[in-house]
Image: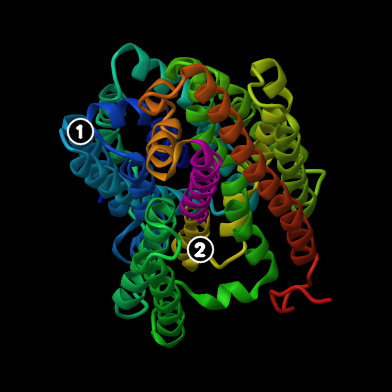
Amino acid sequence: MPVSRSPASTLAVVCAAVPGVPVTATGTAEALGDIGADLRADLASTQWVVNAFFLTFAALMACTGSLADRIGRRRMFIGGLALFAAAMLLATAAQDIGVLILARALAGAGAAATTTGGSALLAHAFPGRVSRSKAFAWFGTTIGLSLAFGPLIAGALVTAIGWRSLFTAAALVLLPILPATALLTESRAPARGPVDWGGAITFTLGLTAFTFAVVEGPALGWTHPGVAGGFVACAVLLAAFAVIERRHPAPLVDLSLLARPRFVAISSMPFLLAFGFVAPTIVLPPYLMATLGYSARQAGLALILLTGPTLIVPPLTGVMARRLSQRALLVTTLLLVGAGTGLLALLPAGSGPARLAAPLLIIGIGFGVSLAVMDGAAISSVDASQAGMAAGLFNTARITGEVVAIAVLGAVLSTLTQASLTVRYGTADAARATSRLLQGDMAGAVPPGADHLEFTRLATAGYAGALQTALWILTALSLAGALAVGRLMSARRGEPAALTA
């Protein structure tokens, strides 16, 4: 068994491996237009390039977290790294949209194993409360760094070389890290019973059914049997998942954790922030490319206003955390995100970077505060033997939120934008135009025979109106979340994890 040189070695290896996940997760948004044109894919197909990654990432979080406790956290971490790198190479070589979607799904599985294995390794290497908080502050800073510069790097690569270069670069960066995993010490928790495959399957299928329904809804129609069936299947499968988890001797997710108000509050944060921060990083680049004529590089540069604070704020928050309660920091996070999305919704269509700066910075600062707090707080709220499970459950909430947020926000934008164009151009042309618009391609969206200037004006207004509605929804969600999290965080230990009148 490899011998760890020091906890610092574990921290260095984990932090070196993590950046590839958020860079390729959010950076893909800048490449969707080129992917759609190169592989002749429609909007729903290109959305699956994003959603397939987040879907397997979310669906396997709890499974990989629980398995990491059983088979070894180091082993899970290494396996995830290898799979992620291989998937990036497959994405680079993809000549068909189906192969690219498969590669992204495999990358999500690798990212899940890497993230949960890495989080559990840090929790084991830094058992003390203070040292663990510092380690996860560095972990958050690393994520902030990749979030801050990910869109810019992705945009620059896509503009200069092409969309395939984004995935090639991710693989090349990760490959040298694999030998460094020899510095890690293996750790695991005592076996608690048989693996909960039933829970893993029902959760994965339930989330897949929901994502299918939301992504395909705008194209097929919300009353289409396949869409309605997707929502019904999701409800049935998740209900079955809950039943299985309560009866299984070694459940994938220990639902008793959800009886702890503080854990529920902390675990709900990434779900809420997926709507307020992560989803905008996906939908804003195509919007800027379509309405302002930005290139992928310019869109990535503009997005630094949103992601940049995630580099600076986490270490500052680590200092403030000594004087402020977790409750105050988490509530402040949601209030800042809600204020930012509200200000963004008030901007007129076609607003440039100067006007976008303040709202995007406010959102980014709010999200940056959370990065230094959430992971360590969630894992520290449970016994050390449940570190992997807690990491899995917490990150499942995080990535499930991202799957839901990206799919829902994309559906809102698609439905409302298409509706605004249907009156003038008819259903078929409006659907095709919306598909190109939401891939960032205004020129390719113009219907045959339509006046270019008139269409650009109507499409910009319709797209901007749809985004404004979506932003008001995000604002309301963040403010309601701030109230709920504040209430749950103030509950005494032993009280039920529910809001009372």
In the rendered structure, find residue 89 and report the number of the disc placed on it. 1
Which amino acid type corresponds to the residue marked 2 in the rendered image? Ala
Q: Which residue is mark 2?
A: 390
Going from the N terminus, do you reach mark 1 or mark 2 first? 1
Q: State whether residue 218 is above or below residue 360.
A: below
Which amino acid type corresponds to the residue marked 1 in the rendered image? Leu
Is most of the magenta stretch helix, strand or loop? helix
Q: Position of residue 18 (x, y in %)?
A: 42, 38
In the image: residue 302, left or right of residue 26:
right
Residue 25 in view (yes/no): no
In the image: residue 299, left or right of residue 325:
left
Q: State whether residue 263 is above or below residue 255.
A: above
Q: Position of residue 300 (x, y in %)?
A: 49, 21
> Residue placed at 26% from the left, 25% from the top?
164
Give neighbour class at mark 2: few <14, some 14-19, many 20+ (Cα, 10 Å). many
Kind of element beneath mark 1: helix
Distance from disc 1 to disc 2, alpha carbons, whole Å, reads 31 Å
Kind of element beneath mark 2: helix
In the image: residue 456, left or right of residue 227:
right
Q: State whether residue 274 is above or below residue 100.
A: below
Image quarter (top left, top right, bottom left or bottom right) of the C terminus = bottom right
Q: Quadrant of residue 340?
A: top right
Q: Position of residue 54 (x, y in %)?
A: 40, 49
- Range of residues picked out in magenta: 401-424
> Residue placed at 41% from the left, 69% from the top?
228
In the image: residue 3, left or right of residue 100:
right
Q: State whether residue 497 is above or below residue 304.
A: below
Give neighbour class at mark 1: few <14, some 14-19, many 20+ (Cα, 10 Å). some
> Residue placed at 60% from the left, 60% from the top?
267
